[in-house]
């Protein structure tokens, strides 16, 4: 039993050290990647261009990163997002998530679909 506790303790210590050594996200790089890849659908300010596309502004950073990771792995299925996420690096994921998390979200109940021209 003591050995099992030791192994779990060592594992969590290693995990916490790895997290502590991870570089801080680069929000400016995240903004650049968002403008290049994400803005066409999710909006330049993270407020989507249509009701079927989620707003990203103001979401929690960990949530955004985890969703990009599951799209990248294919565990979450969406043909467009799977293709996009497959091409971005782990650093891009962290940076873009940090950028969108730092933006002001859309007001509750706001219908953003009329704010943008329709996509044809």
Image: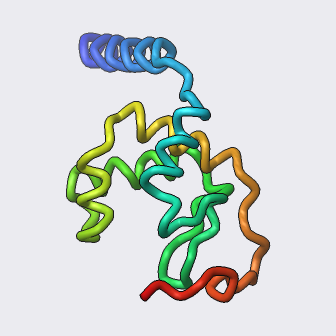
Q: Residue at x 51, y 15 (%)?
A: 20
Tell me where residue 27 appears, x and y as whole percent: 60, 34
- Which quadrant is the C terminus positioned in? bottom left
Q: Nearer the viewer, residue 1 or 16?
A: 16
Against 63, residue 11 (above or below) is: above
Residue at image point 59% right, 67% down: 55
Q: Which image quadrant: the N terminus?
A: top left
**Vertical placement of residue 72 versus 120, above or below:** above
Residue 59, above or below 95: below
Side (left or right) of 34 relative to 111: left
Expressed as whole percent of the image width and height from the top left, the position of residue 37 reads 42, 54
For the image, the number of numbered tags is 0
Q: Residue at x 35, y 34 (%)?
A: 90
Q: Nearer the viewer, residue 13 or 75?
A: 75
Residue 56 figure quarter? bottom right
Figure check: 74 above or below 53: above
Spot occupied by residue 108 in the image (x, y as percentages of width and height): 76, 76
97 lies left or right of 57:
left
């Amino acid at each position: 039993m003591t050995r099992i506790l030791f192994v779990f303790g060592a594992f969590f210590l290693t995990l916490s050290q790895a997290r502590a050594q991870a570089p801080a996200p680069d929000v400016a790089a995240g903004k650049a990647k968002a403008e290049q890849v994400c803005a066409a659908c999710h909006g330049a300010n993270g407020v989507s261009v249509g009701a079927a596309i989620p707003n990203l502004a103001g979401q929690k950073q960990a949530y955004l990163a985890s969703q990009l990771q599951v799209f990248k792995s294919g565990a979450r299925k969406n043909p467009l997002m799977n293709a996009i996420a497959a091409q971005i690096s782990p650093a891009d994921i962290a940076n873009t998530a940090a950028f969108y998390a730092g933006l002001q979200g859309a007001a509750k109940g706001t219908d953003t679909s009329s704010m943008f021209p329709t996509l044809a």
